[in-house]
């Protein structure tokens, strides 16, 4: 079986601060990446124990959230920037895994919650419903007929995912207290649970249905700064809605991902 893992940094155990841990100039950025890498490796161990024959991993954290030197020997890594969705994901994969994710912007107690950009975006809506990276990426996988079978991150990220995939296998790495604080598992415990969760998720392939959102698509973005909308509104494919929001439309989620 072929497995695709999309990773992020914010859902890693012990990672709770943008300025100290997740931005590229953060004091503890390298440590956070190392913690994430070790968690991913544990997850991959479980996936392989569960019968995976090929595992692709995409580092989805903006400036990078993985120490590639420490990555699992069996991982095939999609690396480099810029890189556009669907990143090589296609119908040949059997399952989609979301590692280390965060809830959408403005989620109560959501640890490091944001929607694509913590510095630029306030909210996003797809076909009238608030959405973040979890729902969008699960739906994009679903458009290829691929089920999203696993999620790890803080408790609010897991709750968000369960709205789309109620029976998804999940690992809660921390419980949110605020956007920048949490009750976190120790790294060693998180790795233990991730390895077990990866194996369990492999057993659920065939039981969990792909999550899909029917086309056509209307994607609205609310930016934090009005001048940023001014720049977006110069494009012919963008409709400005008000001082801070703009809209794009498309027939596929790939199209939306490329233009949003």
Image (cartoon, grey):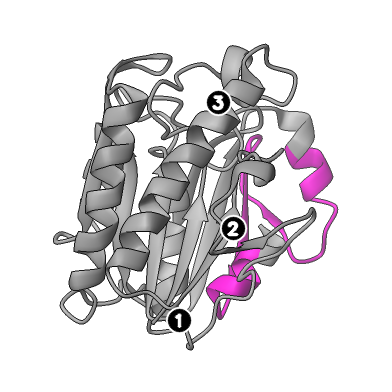
Q: Tell me the residue that label 2 is attached to.
A: 58
Which quarter of the picture shows residue 69? Answer: top right
Does residue 36 appear left or right of residue 244 in this picture? left
Which residue is rendered at x = 64% and y = 67% of the image?
A: 85
* Secondary structure beneath label 3: helix
125 in the magenta segment: no
Where residue 90 appears, as percent x and y from the top left, is: 53, 83
- Contact? badges 3 and 1 (CB < 8 Å): no
Q: Does the residue at mark 2 contact the one at mark 3 (Cβ under 8 Å)? A: no
The residue that label 3 is drawn on is 32
Alpha-carbon span between mark 2 and mark 3: 17 Å
The answer for how far apart the CA atoms under marks 3 and 1 are is 29 Å
- Going by the image, does 240 lie left or right of 162? right
Q: Quadrant of the N terminus?
A: bottom left
Element at badge 2?
A: strand
Residue behind mark 1:
93
Task: Name the N-terminal-most of marks 2 and 3.
Answer: 3
Nearest the viewer among 72 and 102 is 72
* 117 lies above or below 51: above
């Amino acid at each position: 079986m072929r497995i695709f893992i999309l990773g992020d940094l914010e859902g890693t155990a012990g990672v709770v601060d943008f300025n100290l841990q997740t931005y590229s100039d953060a004091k503890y950025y390298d440590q956070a990446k190392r913690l994430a890498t070790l968690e991913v490796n544990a997850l991959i161990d479980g996936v392989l124990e569960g019968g995976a024959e090929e595992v692709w991993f995409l580092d989805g954290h903006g400036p990078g959230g993985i120490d590639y030197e420490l990555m699992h020997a069996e991982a095939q890594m999609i690396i480099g920037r810029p890189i556009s969705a669907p990143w090589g994901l296609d119908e040949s994969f059997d399952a989609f895994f979301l590692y280390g994710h965060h809830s959408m912007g403005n989620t109560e107690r959501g640890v490091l919650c944001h929607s694509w950009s913590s510095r630029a975006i306030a909210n996003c809506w797809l076909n009238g419903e608030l959405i973040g990276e979890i729902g969008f990426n699960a739906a994009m996988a679903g458009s290829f007929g691929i089920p999203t079978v696993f999620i790890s991150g803080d408790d609010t990220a897991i709750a968000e995912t369960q709205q789309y995939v109620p029976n998804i296998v999940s690992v809660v790495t921390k419980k949110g207290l605020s956007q920048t604080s949490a009750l976190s598992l120790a790294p060693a415990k998180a790795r233990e649970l991730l390895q077990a969760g990866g194996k369990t998720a492999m057993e659920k392939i065939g039981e969990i249905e792909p999550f899909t959102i029917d086309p056509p698509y209307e994607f609205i973005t609310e930016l934090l700064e009005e001048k940023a909308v001014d720049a977006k509104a110069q494009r012919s494919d963008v409709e400005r809605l008000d001082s801070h929001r703009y809209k794009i439309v498309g027939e596929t989620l790939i199209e939306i991902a490329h233009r949003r």
